[in-house]
Image (cartoon, rainbow, N blue to C red):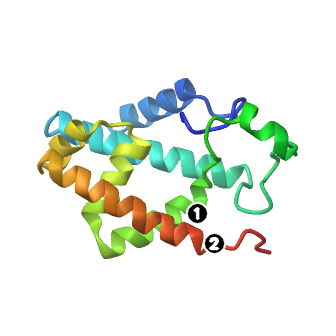
Amino acid sequence: MAGECLGHMLQTTALVNEAYLRLVDCGQVKWQDRAHFFAVSAQLMRRILIDFARSRGYLKRGGAVPHIPLEEAPSVCSEPDVNLVALDDALSALAAVDERKSKVVELKFFGGLSVEETAEVLRVSSDTVIRNWKLAKIWLLRELSRETPHEG
């Protein structure tokens, strides 16, 4: 949520609340450990954010995002807006090629986990997480750059 524009409709508290409600509904889940909880939570947050993005029509022509002149953009958003739907599609494609790299991105980007926490969840070393994170970012950047800005 840190990279989203100010005034984004789905705030961090709402995201965590929605994830909590879905976790509570998963009464049959037998939690193995803290790492298992983090993995499921990150996956839920990813689904919630993607569902929200799809429902807001972010995929086509910017959804209901108001027009902001280019010179005002730096003061409104601290980072470039991420098209979550395109990211989700690219992440799914990455999972088909390398499941662990996809999980690293899901845990770090959607779950907000640190390198150490991600390593604990995936039961790998921190160095492996760092390496996977770097390679996954490059792969995703390449995939997302293939997107044409004026689809339709």
> Which circle marks residue 73 in the picture?
none
Q: Which of marks 2 and 1 is in front?
A: 2
User: For the residue labelled by badge 2, is the local secondary structure a helix, a strand or a loop?
Assistant: loop
Q: What distance separates the C-alpha of mark 2 from that of mark 1?
A: 8 Å
Q: Give the amino acid at mark 1.
A: Ala
Residue 120 vertical position relative to residue 103 in the rendered view, above or below? above
Residue bearing the label numbered 1? 86
Q: Residue at x 32, y 63 (%)?
A: 135
Q: Which residue is drawn at 17% across and 54% down?
A: 128
- Tell me the quarter of the picture where residue 69 sits: top right
Residue 52 vertical position relative to residue 103 in the rendered view, above or below? above
Q: 10 Å neighbourhood of mark 2: few (<14), some, or many (≥20)?
A: few
- Tell me the quarter of the picture where residue 145 sits: bottom right
Q: Using residue 81 as the reference point, say whether residue 120 is left or right of it.
A: left
User: For the residue labelled by badge 1, is the local secondary structure a helix, a strand or a loop?
Assistant: helix
Q: 10 Å neighbourhood of mark 1: few (<14), some, or many (≥20)?
A: some
Asked if the residue at tag 1 contacts the one at tag 2, i.e. Cβ–Cβ closer than 8 Å, the answer is: yes
Q: Using residue 136 as the reference point, say whether residue 11 is left or right of it.
A: right
Residue 73 % position (x, y): 77, 40
Residue 11 % position (x, y): 60, 29
Residue bearing the label numbered 2? 147
State the residue lying farthest toward the top. 13
Residue 31 vertical position relative to residue 145 in the rendered view, above or below? above
Q: Which residue is drawn at 59% across and 59% down?
A: 85
> Which part of the image, by quadrant, shows the C terminus?
bottom right
Residue 126 % position (x, y): 16, 45
